[in-house]
Amino acid sequence: MTINQNVYKWFIVALTFSTFKESFAFTPSVSKNQRCRKSHQLQYSAQHEDIFRAVHRKEHEMIAVKKEHTATTDSVRVAMGYAEQSIPKMRVAKALRRVYEDIDNKANPNARNTTQEEGEKEEKLKEIGMQEIGMRRGSFIVDIKRKSISQPGVNYCHYDDAGLVAEAMVRLGADVVFVNVDFAGYGGDITELKSAVRSVRKISDTAAVIMKDIVVDEIQLGLAKEAGADGVLLMASVLGPSLENFVNLATVIGLETIVECHTKEEIERAIYLVAQNIMVTNYDRVSGEYFPQQAIKLAGLFPGSGGPIITLAGGGIKTTDDMKKHLAVGYDGVVVGQAVMGSARAPEFIRAVRDRTLLPAELSHWGMDTEFDVDGNVILPEEEDINNFKP
């Protein structure tokens, strides 16, 4: 993929402009003094907030939110009360699989017709259980956030509106964007999710927008649906036994889900619930610790290439080597946050994932580190100047 130079310049200008604007000025209705005070609170309020405090806070926040949406005619309640009747668009799954770039993928509306010889070959592969085995294309997911409860006191990037960042990332090639809406923990809110949906829809019919929040109440699914999000992130460590109810409700109202897991037990639970998209994070939300090899160690729990489950890896992925290692063991995509937020080298990170093809997941544990470009040609080993990049 060749990055359009105008897009690249536009991204740098937008990023620079946002960085020098007053931090967190996405609530224009408040006064300057209020805005400065809110910015100060945003920077320090979650410094010592672990996941237990965050969940407790979120539960109290949702009590107030539900009081605002009690009427049966309320748009959020309406979004929660109607079952999806049409065929699901599956924008998230298709974006993660990059089906619109594969003319041989039957999920692609513009897929070409197979010849009789190709059809016979498919039938033979199906008989021996190898129909889905083939070269893979990795997807790139950007986690848009100003900060994180996993790194208290650290501000990743200052920007006015997540919608501008989402549009820039999609223009540069991101397949999916996570938009954080938890103000205290991540520095975003629901209005930015709506802005991101509008901005992404304006430039792409295929890129997907995910609401990322500490989901503890069903009303949050209604908020995501009403905002126009394609899906929502559900944390297995937070929801526990309630995960099934949230997955089912999301499916009924037409929201795709990405289930975040960290342990073997959480992954097995997500697979049992037939979660289509599963993200394995290296970050343990319960203990607050990072385990850089966790996702790599658990990669073998999933079915092979082209199966019903789309697998993602995230948490502390900061270099191109990190991304390649996680993709090489079988993951379909990587979720990157801090490494690209506020970084002018985001295009290089995106290209490092999207401008290559990957061996089938069934061969991922054979120790083969050969890399291929988008046309399937072997990429000769060479030094990459961003391997040691430190954000």
Image (cartoon, helix red, strand yellow):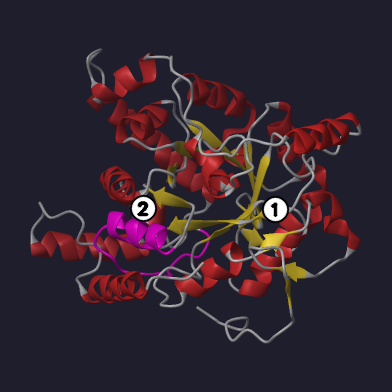
Q: Residue 111, position in %: x, y?
A: 57, 39
Of residue 149 and residue 342, the one placed in the foreground of this image is: 342
Residue indicated by mark 2: 184
Q: Residue 373, position in %: x, y?
A: 66, 67
As shown in the figure, which amino acid type bears the numbered disc 2? Ala
- In the image, residue 164 lies in the stretch drawn in magenta: yes
Of residue 14 and residue 41, the one placed in the foreground of this image is: 14
- In the image, residue 243 lies in the stretch drawn in magenta: no
Q: Residue 125, position in %: x, y?
A: 86, 36
Residue under the point 49% across and 67% down: 338
* Residue 190 visible in the snapshot: yes
* Residue 291 visible in the snapshot: no
Horizontal arrangement in the rendering, residue 283 relative to residue 77 (left or right): right
Q: What stretch is highlighted in magenta?
A: 150-172
Q: Residue 115, position in %: x, y?
A: 71, 36
Residue indicated by mark 1: 136
